[in-house]
């Protein structure tokens, strides 16, 4: 009887496997950049036929812009961007292969810091459906973090092959519109699944857990957004989260890097910019 030799694969954490994945990530970013460049008719942000997916192209460095981000995943296929929340600065770019996640609605200042006509800034943003995240959290049986750990509402992470592959497939669907209605929800769900499995995925999951501190903060943010023109009593705002005023300030600042009043001021400044 002939002897059959079974070749064992190298462990997933071996340098060889890591090198292969890093090259695959680099290749996927190049492919994503080419797709975004082809699908953006000019400079600016463009909504797409896929719900909650926006593509962007910028050919020059721009001045900082105030805006309010909804919960979303932000990827840069080429270039770099700096986002400031309160006094904190987050930078993500294609060279370091990092993504940015907003787990809450947050007023920030953003600036593209690496873009030229020859090498434009190319990016995408996928806004989240929090109901879909809640459904996945239940299916994946994700547990809550200790109550004392209140996560910041914005964070960065390292791009992986597992996350980039469905993102590229999602953008590719824009070139086959007949497939979008059926396949886009499936691919989007896979992206959220991969994101929740990332080391920082628990930060996003907290927002979907019933009565978690993150979800309480989300209720407070909703009140501030709906009533940002009004003078508000902090006692009334704290009641929305069933906290004391001091607890509200502590937990709110842990998530948003600012006090509720500073948050409200940022919303007012954003409205002033729009007008």
Image (cartoon, helix red, strand yellow):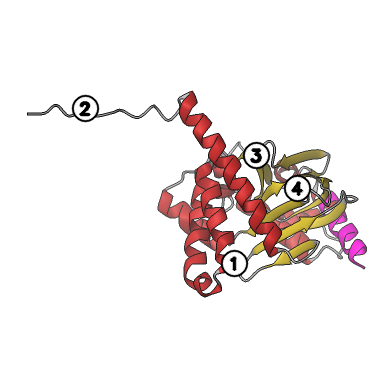
Query: Marks 2 and 1, Cα distance to the nearest angstrom?
Result: 45 Å
- The rendered magenta stretch, by its main secondary structure, is classed as helix
Residue 228 placed where, x, y %? Answer: 83, 62
CB-based contact (under 8 Å), mark 3 and mark 4: no
Crowdedness near tag 3: few (<14), some (14–19) or many (≥20) residues, C-alpha within 10 Å:
many
Q: Nearer the viewer, mark 3 or mark 4?
A: 3
* Residue 68 lies in the magenta stretch: no
Disc nearest the viewer among 1 and 4: 1
267 in magenta: yes
Task: Give the mark nearer the N terminus: 1 vs 4.
Answer: 1
Which numbered dot is residue 5? 2
The one nearer the camera, 212 or 81, is 81
Quadrant where the C terminus lies? bottom right
CB contact under 8 Å: marks 1 and 4: no
Q: Are marks 2 and 1 in contact (CB under 8 Å)?
A: no
Q: Which mark is residue 217?
A: none
Cα separation, mark 3 vs mark 2, equals 39 Å
- The local secondary structure at tag 3 comes to loop
Q: Find disc 3 in the rendering and name its residue.
A: 97
Mark pair 1, 3: CA separation? 23 Å
Name the residue tied to disc 4.
245
Q: Badge 4 local density, few (<14 within 10 Å), some, or many (20+)?
A: some
């Amino acid at each position: 009887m002939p002897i059959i030799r079974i070749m064992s694969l190298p462990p997933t954490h071996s340098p060889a496997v890591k090198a292969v994945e890093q090259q695959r990530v680099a290749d996927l970013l190049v492919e994503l950049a080419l797709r975004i460049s082809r699908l953006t008719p000019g400079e600016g942000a463009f909504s797409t036929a896929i719900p909650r997916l926006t593509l962007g192209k910028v050919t020059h460095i721009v001045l900082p812009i105030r805006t309010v981000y909804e919960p979303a995943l932000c990827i840069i296929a080429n270039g770099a961007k700096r986002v400031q929340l309160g006094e904190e600065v987050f930078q993500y770019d294609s060279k370091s292969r990092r993504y940015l996640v907003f787990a809450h609605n947050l007023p920030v200042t953003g600036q593209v810091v690496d873009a030229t006509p020859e090498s434009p800034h190319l990016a995408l943003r996928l806004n989240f459906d929090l109901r879909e995240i809640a459904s996945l959290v239940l299916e994946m049986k994700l547990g809550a973090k200790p109550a004392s750990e209140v996560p910041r509402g914005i964070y960065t992470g390292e791009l992986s092959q597992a996350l980039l592959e469905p993102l590229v497939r999602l953008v590719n669907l824009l070139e086959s519109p007949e497939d979008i209605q059926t396949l886009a929800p499936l691919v989007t769900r896979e992206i959220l699944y991969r994101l929740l499995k990332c080391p920082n995925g628990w930060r996003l999951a907290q927002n979907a857990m019933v009565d978690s501190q993150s979800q309480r903060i989300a209720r407070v943010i909703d009140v501030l957004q709906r009533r940002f023109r009004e003078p508000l009593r902090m006692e009334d705002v704290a009641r929305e989260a069933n906290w004391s005023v001091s607890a509200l300030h502590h937990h709110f600042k842990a998530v948003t890097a600012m006090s509720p009043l500073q948050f409200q001021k940022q919303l007012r400044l954003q409205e002033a910019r729009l007008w």
